[in-house]
Image: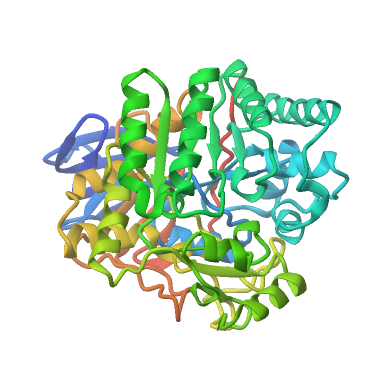
Amino acid sequence: MSEHDVVIRGGRIIDPETGFDAVGDVAITGGRIDAVIPGGSTGLHGREEWDATGQVVAPGFIDLHSHCADPASRRLQVCDGVTTALELEAGMLDMSGAYARMAEHGSPNNFGYSASWALARMSVCGIDVSAGLPAFLANIGAPAWHRELSDRERGRMLEMLRRELDDGALGIGVLLGYCRETPGVEYLEVAGLAAETASPTYTHVRDLGRPDSGLLGAIEVVAAALDSGAHMHLCHINSTSVRAVDRVHALLDEARRDGLRVTTEAYPYGSGATGIGAQFLDPAELAASGRSPSDVVYLATNERIATAERLVELRAQDPGGLAIVEFLREESPDDLGYLTRALLHDDTAVASDAMPLSPGDPARDVGWPVPASVTTHPRTAGTFARILRWYVRELQILDLTEAVRRCTLVPAQILEAVSSDMRRKGRVQAGADADLVIFDPQTVTDRATYSSPVEPSTGFSYVVVNGTPVVKGGTLQLNALPGLPVRGGR
């Protein structure tokens, strides 16, 4: 009789691909799922056996949009059920180096990167981007890259992106909203490269400093899909579409009916976070888009900006300093409706846009629990548990099985064409990767708030990555670093 590494007994097993939803047992050996037995079976024996009675056994959550590189922020995501956290919107350059550094330091969850259009563009403009995301944030408003590129520079940039795709990038991340000066032809060329290499793009749509920027930005993405045939993914549709989200959805529905591959994601918060030096946080741009400096909170001091003059001062002093930006008021029924519809539209993936810690350093471990002096956006720690607590249990507008699907299978399927690794994730089936979450649907909850943003989620009794528990019996296993790279394959 064979003995498995682990047998999970008596849980409600949800496999979103097959629709399997029944109480049973799951066997794990060597980082893969060996068997899923409905009703349980005395024929399964494990060196370890976990009782999941009254709990849900589901695929581990896949976050397509995480800017977390340091150990503490990735631990916060693990406590939120995230077994795979990918940097796709901003991306990276030097794929070999990025993957090697994360593997050397170790990660509690799986990791992967897109090729960064913004960093490539900065590089050809003479900016040192070797530090990755911190370099982008530090130069977010630098005039050097806020200009039209020459034909030669565009060619160099596209060749850089092509090399990164050849080296395992999961597509191309396009922070178009941070460089309004980018000509439309450049974006079409990037989309053309994506189509040629069968790679997705992940776009933060262009912000034009007006209330309907989200709609116009989405139109540009759809036009690029139509022109190139590339798979175009719209990042955080809630924060860029805002109150135009219904019209954006209508546009995307029409594009899909016409056979275009256009996918989306959203997170369940009415505020975003970015570097305070971002072009669209200029006081005049805020006013043109219907916002004011008081909609911005500078995280380093937790200061809500009182005047345009103070905002200008902070943007000059610390352009890469993180700021929270309110775009919808969650206490408003109308705004809550926009936020909810952004997430509930067909096949929208849940993605956190998890942010680095502030103050932070990707190479530094601030320890555990995360000190209260460290801050971030609460979505870093709470996005997925918030879906289960707020949308499923309290608002009752999302069925548990559908919530699980949007956190697991939907993001896996967005990436399957570019990464064979993702064909084994987002499922509870024999042969799938043993990336699993076990949680109590009645108690799972987010605890991160805007005033206490680094409080880890609770209610997950186990979070398993490649067969290794990183949360066990509800306790984070600090030394468990089983995360593996998720790479693109061409």
State which quadrant residue 154 falls in: top right
What residue is rendered at 61% in x and 16% in y? 196
| Front-most of residues 392 and 193 | 193
- Which residue does the image show at 66% across and 24% down from the upper left? 189
| Direction left: furthest residue | 39
Q: In the image shown, does 163 or 104 lie closer to the viewer? A: 163
Image quarter hosting the C terminus: top right
Q: The N terminus appears in which quarter of the rendering?
A: top left
Frontmost residue, 322 versus 74: 322
> Residue at horizontal 66%, vertical 81%?
310
**Residue 288 point in image, percent of width and height:** 53, 60
In the image, is residue 421 above or below residue 113? Answer: above
The percent position of residue 328, horizontal first and vertical second, equals: 38, 64
**78 left or right, relative to 484:** left
The image shows residue 431 at horizontal and vertical percentages of 37, 28
Quadrant position of residue 361? bottom right
Q: What scheme was used to colour the molecule?
A: rainbow
Please provide percent x and percent y for residue 69: 62, 56
Report if residue 59 is visible in the image: no
